[in-house]
């Protein structure tokens, strides 16, 4: 056995195929393949995290679109399904860590790959902070004990307390992810199992308490949009952000590809199953909640959100049990977001596309995972929270910016993929997931959808980016400014400094085929 040959049992045929895909990208296998089907499915489900998203943003949708905002749920699902189908073909061809970065690089070249990876990595760190903020929306409603800062009535009490709770959560996810993917996957899978059971039980309980039919529920608009240029359609577009904020992150199933068993077959299935399961379960929770709440016009729907519905309809005891399940869902969601960010940073670092690339790409021999990225992402996530500690609009602003950047990173994949299709250069993996003749129309819709929703998410709505006075133009245009600065400064650094150093680091480079066969 040569020094380049790994010890242990020979890889399974599926793993050999996936290792060959890695070699095609220039990498040698380093991360240990231990994750099975449910682990990869759970990673996608926990990132989407239906209980986290619905409980965090239900109030927003109702406030801006009334109960009829529910129709944005199937709309967003249809658009994201097109993106997910494109990702399934890519996951079958290239099941690789930091999938969005590597896919963008392979399809669009190193410059597109870098900006896609940079946007996704930054967005992931902001998303981690945004998810951590969800503790504040749930824990104090379970018990006022969790309101450590003030009594919750002060202008910045909620924001400051959210930073405290969120920082504790990020510390936990950093610790778990640093101890290796196997521990993370076990906790994540257990959490997802609890989340799915709780979600199904919640659907049944809400269905048992419905007080009105879907006809009257899903047409109620509260008269919103009246007098505006676009009428209710404008209000609906704003409210649709509540759904757009939830259904993303399904690519995580592929981003763990280098640590999964037979990912070229399992990752596409996990992506679709995670998205479809989240759509069905989340849609039923939202629908039955609106049908079960005693007063459909209650002001608390747009302030207390889904937590108010659960406590009102199911009572304090059962309601609090459900809310504790939401806390579990938030926890594993943050865990999955952090894990995805680690793989992305590792992937960019082993291409020497980040400062201190060799350090960031180092895999711990003890924990079999990149430990330094876990710490860096955790620290940045806490810093983002602390910077916004006195910002009462912290929830909507941070969440909005994070999601826009992820939609843009997805566009950095689907757009060059479309170009490759039009040039006849894209070929799905033989014997793996393929869209066949539907590939081109699906890809076109995915690009159009991603562009349209990115504009909708970033639109300078005062109600989203500067909801409380005083009004400032730079807050209202915050999405364009922040994302423009992140993209501009990041790409300038890459263009003038990092691109001259880029290339797979020697310690991560695939060995020549001859050596691997010796």
Image (cartoon, rainbow, N blue to C red):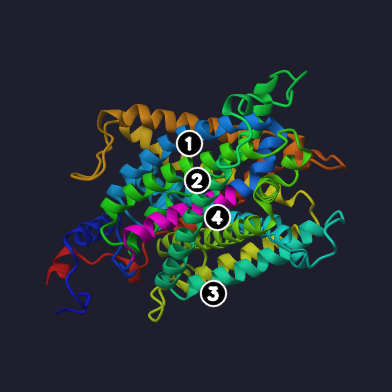
Let me know if residue 40 is in the magenta part.
Answer: yes
Comes first in the chain, label 3 or label 1: 1
User: Decide: marks 2, 4 in contact (CB < 8 A)?
Assistant: no
Q: Is residue 507 above or below residue 387?
A: below
Q: Is residue 479 above or below residue 354?
A: above
Measured in 3D between alpha carbons, the distance from the residue under mark 3 to the one under mark 1, in whole angstroms, is: 33 Å
Q: Is residue 147 above or below residue 303?
A: below
What x and y, as percent, mark residue 451?
52, 32
Residue behind mark 2: 248
Measured in 3D between alpha carbons, the distance from the residue under mark 2 to the one under mark 4, in whole angstroms, is: 11 Å
Residue at x 45% of width, y 47% of height: 111
Whether residue 25 can be seen here: yes
What x and y, as percent, mark residue 79?
47, 33
Measured in 3D between alpha carbons, the distance from the residue under mark 2 to the one under mark 1, in whole angstroms, is: 10 Å
- Nearer the observer: mark 2 or 1; the answer is 1
Residue behind mark 4: 124
Quadrant placement of the C terminus: bottom left
Whether residue 352 can be seen here: no
The boundaries of the magenta stretch are 35-53
Residue at x 69% of width, y 56% of height: 316
Measured in 3D between alpha carbons, the distance from the residue under mark 1 to the one under mark 4, in whole angstroms, is: 21 Å
Measured in 3D between alpha carbons, the distance from the residue under mark 2 to the one under mark 3, in whole angstroms, is: 25 Å
Residue behind mark 1: 77
What x and y, as percent, mark residue 93?
28, 48
Q: Is residue 131 above or below residue 190?
A: above
- Which of these two is toward me, 331 or 347? 331
Comes first in the chain, label 2 or label 3: 3
Comes first in the chain, label 2 or label 1: 1
Residue at x 76% of width, y 63% of height: 161
Comes first in the chain, label 3 or label 4: 4
């Amino acid at each position: 056995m040569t020094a380049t040959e790994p010890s242990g049992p020979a890889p399974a045929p599926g793993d050999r195929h996936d290792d060959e895909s890695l070699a095609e990208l220039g990498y040698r296998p380093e991360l240990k393949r231990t994750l099975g089907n449910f682990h990869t499915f759970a990673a996608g489900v926990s990132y989407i995290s239906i209980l986290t998203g619905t409980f965090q943003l239900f109030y927003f949708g109702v406030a801006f679109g009334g109960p009829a905002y529910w129709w944005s749920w199937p709309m967003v699902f249809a658009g994201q399904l097109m993106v997910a189908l494109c990702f399934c073909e890519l996951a079958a061809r290239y099941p690789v860590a930091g999938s969005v970065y590597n896919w963008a690089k392979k399809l669009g070249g190193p410059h597109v790959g870098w900006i896609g990876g940079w946007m996704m990595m930054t967005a992931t760190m902001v998303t981690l902070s945004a998810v951590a903020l969800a503790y504040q929306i749930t824990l104090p409603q379970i018990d006022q004990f969790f309101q450590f800062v003030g009594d919750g009535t002060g202008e910045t009490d909620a924001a400051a307390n959210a930073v405290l709770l969120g920082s504790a959560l990020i510390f936990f996810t950093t610790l778990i992810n640093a101890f290796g993917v196997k521990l993370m996957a076990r906790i994540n899978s257990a959490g997802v199992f609890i989340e799915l059971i709780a979600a199904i039980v919640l659907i049944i309980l809400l269905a048992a308490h419905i007080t009105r039919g879907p006809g009257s529920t899903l047409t109620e608009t509260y008269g919103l949009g009246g007098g505006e240029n676009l009428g209710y359609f404008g209000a609906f577009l704003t409210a649709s952000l509540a759904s757009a904020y939830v259904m993303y992150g399904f690519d995580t199933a592929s981003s763990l590809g280098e640590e999964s068993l037979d990912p070229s077959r399992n990752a596409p299935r996990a992506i679709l199953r995670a998205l479809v399961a989240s759509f069905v379960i989340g849609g039923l929770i939202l629908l039955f909640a609106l049908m079960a709440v005693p007063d459909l016009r209650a002001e608390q729907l747009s302030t207390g959100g889904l937590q108010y519905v659960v406590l009102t309809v199911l009572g304090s005891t059962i309601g609090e049990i459900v809310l504790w399940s939401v806390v579990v869902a938030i926890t594993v969601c943050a865990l999955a977001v952090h894990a995805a960010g680690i793989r992305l940073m590792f992937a960019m670092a082993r291409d020497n596309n980040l400062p201190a690339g060799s350090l960031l790409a180092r895999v711990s021999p003890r924990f079999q995972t990149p430990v330094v990225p876990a710490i860096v992402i955790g620290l940045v996530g806490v810093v983002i929270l602390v910077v916004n500690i006195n910002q009462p609009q912290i929830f909507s602003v941070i969440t909005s910016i994070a999601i826009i950047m992820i939609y843009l990173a997805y566009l950095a994949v689907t757009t060059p993929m479309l170009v490759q299709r039009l040039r006849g250069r894209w070929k799905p993996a033989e014997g793996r997931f393929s869209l066949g003749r539907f590939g081109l129309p699906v890809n076109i819709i995915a690009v159009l959808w991603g562009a349209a929703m990115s504009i909708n998410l970033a639109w300078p709505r005062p109600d989203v980016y500067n909801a409380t006075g005083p009004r400032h133009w730079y807050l209202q245009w915050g999405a364009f400014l922040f994302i423009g600065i992140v993209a501009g400064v990041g790409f300038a650094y890459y263009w003038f400094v990092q691109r001259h150093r880029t290339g797979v680091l020697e310690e991560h480079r695939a060995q020549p085929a001859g050596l691997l066969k010796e």
